[in-house]
Image (tube, helix red, strand yellow):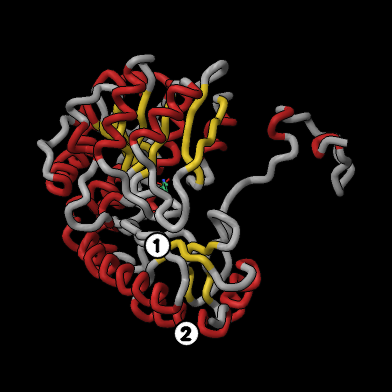
Amino acid sequence: MPANSAPTLDGSVLPVPRDDIADAAPYGAPQLEVEHALNVNENPYGPSPQLAEHIGRAVAEAARGLNRYPDRDALALRADLGTYLAAESGIPAPAAEAVWAANGSNEIMHQLMLAYGGPGRSALGFLPHYSMYPEYARDTFTRWVAAERGPAPEFALTAQAVTAAIAAHRPHIVVLTSPNNPTGTALELEVVEAAAVALAETRGLLVVDEAYGEFRRDGVPSSLTVLEQHPNLVVTRTMSKAFALAGARLGYLVAHPAIVDTVRIVRLPYHLSAVTQAVARTALSHREELLGTVALLRGERDALAVHLTARGHQVAPSDANFILFRTFTDRDRVFEALLERSVLVRAVGPTGWLRVSVGTPQDNVAFRTALEEADPR
Ligand SMILES: *Cc1c(COP(=O)(O)O)cnc(C)c1O
């Protein structure tokens, strides 16, 4: 009996949902109260009291106009995001028309699949990949096709592997993630460019998800630097990770303005609240403070990778704010043993591997200490 026809506890007879979601459960990492939450790659440093106050003032200002709908096109915010990207990646500032913003890059990706996926169309990604991609595909009736990244512990993706998968599956959309979640792997530009060129032949869309872009190591370029040469390339970013603003929900993309115009067709009216726009613009104007923790987190990440390697773990080289490593014993037991010590990590990626977010130095010490007992050598 499908779940939707089961009687509910209160005996109500309920409407029948879509067949393909009838047995699905809402997806998401467990939200548990722990001392060391190292499971969803948040920035552990919240805004300073001064910045919180600035944000509060901006919200109060916006509140006085909340009887009106927000700026539907969020042009001021999109211009600010362009200015930020120029400073961050060394590219000329993209015009507001080449930037698009939404409630998290999850909504951005959803909008891209709405506009470029759909019935009879497919999207291709490479495992292990972010667990939400197949869900946006399902929601938009896009067929999700998963190819594989190279072997552990590098989980590399080569131009040859990507173009072969494109030739084999002929997808309408390809999603590349750099640095990748859950492996932390950054892509060489030649891989991104080879994918863009291969997809251009069938007029397909290439999306490079750079949610962790700001954490990449020195000398690792952003795909933003090749955007000009590839009109079918979209680079997505978020303020949820490096920017320490996960609670505000602000993601964005940069692309050819014609792609932005297409996405505007499927967005919901007034999707980005005036409050969100005000919060994001205020955070952007304090970017030195918010991004000040990135160097610290990168240093902690590299130290953690050295530590795990020295313990004898297999460790995936990471350009992000988390590390995927292989446990010595059953990963679910290690996960539980860490949780008993109030350290919450994530059981994702291939069997036997765990992902730990980089926290404050105190979080990281707590993780290392707990791991000694949870996964003895
Ligand atoms: C965290 C993450 C995002 C960001 O999602 P938001 O909706 O912006 O919070 C996007 N892509 C990947 C791969 C992520 O891990």
Total residue callouts: 2
Q: Is residue 168 visible?
A: yes
Q: Which quarter of the figure has residue 84?
A: top left
Q: Is residue 265 left or right of residue 327?
A: left
Between 157 and 73, the one lying in front of the other is: 157
Residue 283 drawn at (x, y percent): 24, 53
Tell me which amino acid carries mark 1. Answer: Phe
Does residue 280 appear left or right of residue 338 in this picture?
A: left
> At 87% from the left edge and 40% from the top edge, which residue is drawn?
6
Instruction: Report crowding for label 2: few under 14, some 14 to 19, many 20 or more residues within 10 A (C-alpha).
Output: few
Q: Residue at x 29, y 67 (%)?
A: 297
Ligand 1 has an atom within 8 Å of the beta carbon of the residue at disc 2 = no
Q: Which mark is residue 350?
A: none
Residue positioned 49% across, 28% down in the render: 123
Which x, y percent locates residue 3? Answer: 81, 39
How packed is label 1: few (under 14 Cα within 10 Å), some, or many (20 or more)?
A: many
Q: Nearer the viewer, residue 13 or 257?
A: 257
Q: Is residue 353 left or right of residue 111?
A: right
In-front residue for pair 107/176: 176
Compared to residue 312, the image places residue 287 above or below, namely: above
Q: Position of residue 365 (x, y in %)?
A: 40, 82
Q: CA distance from mark 2 to mark 1?
A: 17 Å
The residue where tag 1 is placed is 322
Secondary structure of residue under mark 2: helix
Q: Quadrant of the N terminus?
A: top right
Residue for badge 2: 369
**What type is the residue that disc 2 sits on?**
Thr
Q: Secondary structure at mark 1?
A: strand
Q: Which numbered disc flags the more N-terminal residue, 2 or 1?
A: 1
Q: Are marks 2 and 1 in contact (CB under 8 Å)?
A: no
